[in-house]
Image (tube, rainbow, N blue to C red):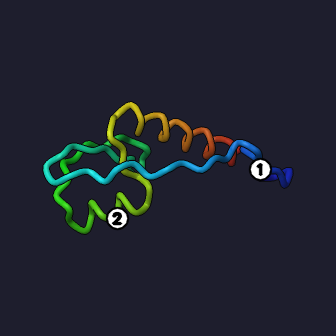
Amino acid sequence: HADGKDCYAGKRQIVDYQCKPKIGEPYYYIDCFLDIVDDIWSGDRMDDLVYTSGNCFKTKNEAQRYADKFSEILKCRKS
């Protein structure tokens, strides 16, 4: 950031990974446009990448909360 400060300093927290979905279960992830995508777990490479990156959510609402946080962080970088 321009003033050398982290706009979210002190607000970080450790979050546990959710349980990995089982084959056939729905899950949600955030795409590069910060849109929420729904999918069905098949255990393929894409599912594993989404899960291991921490971008796997049980509910659309939970995914949206994180997308909103990401959006705020990116807005902070602009100022």
Q: Is residue 48 above or below residue 54?
A: below
Q: Residue at x 36, y 58 (%)?
A: 51
Coordinates of residue 25 in the picture (x, y in percent): 18, 45
Question: At label 1, which amino acid type do we have?
Answer: Asp
Coordinates of residue 5 in the picture (x, y in percent): 82, 50
Q: Residue at x 51, y 36 (%)?
A: 68
Q: Nearer the viewer, mark 1 or mark 2?
A: 2
Residue 28 badge: none
Q: Which residue is mark 1?
A: 6
Q: Nearer the viewer, residue 25 or 75?
A: 25
Q: How far apart, in angstroms, are the residues tagged by discs 1 and 2?
A: 28 Å
Coordinates of residue 10 in the picture (x, y in percent): 76, 45
Coordinates of residue 47 in the picture (x, y in percent): 27, 60
* In the image: residue 41, left or right of residue 2: left
Residue 49 badge: 2
Q: Residue 11: tell me if it is visible.
A: yes
Quarter of the picture containing the C terminus is top right
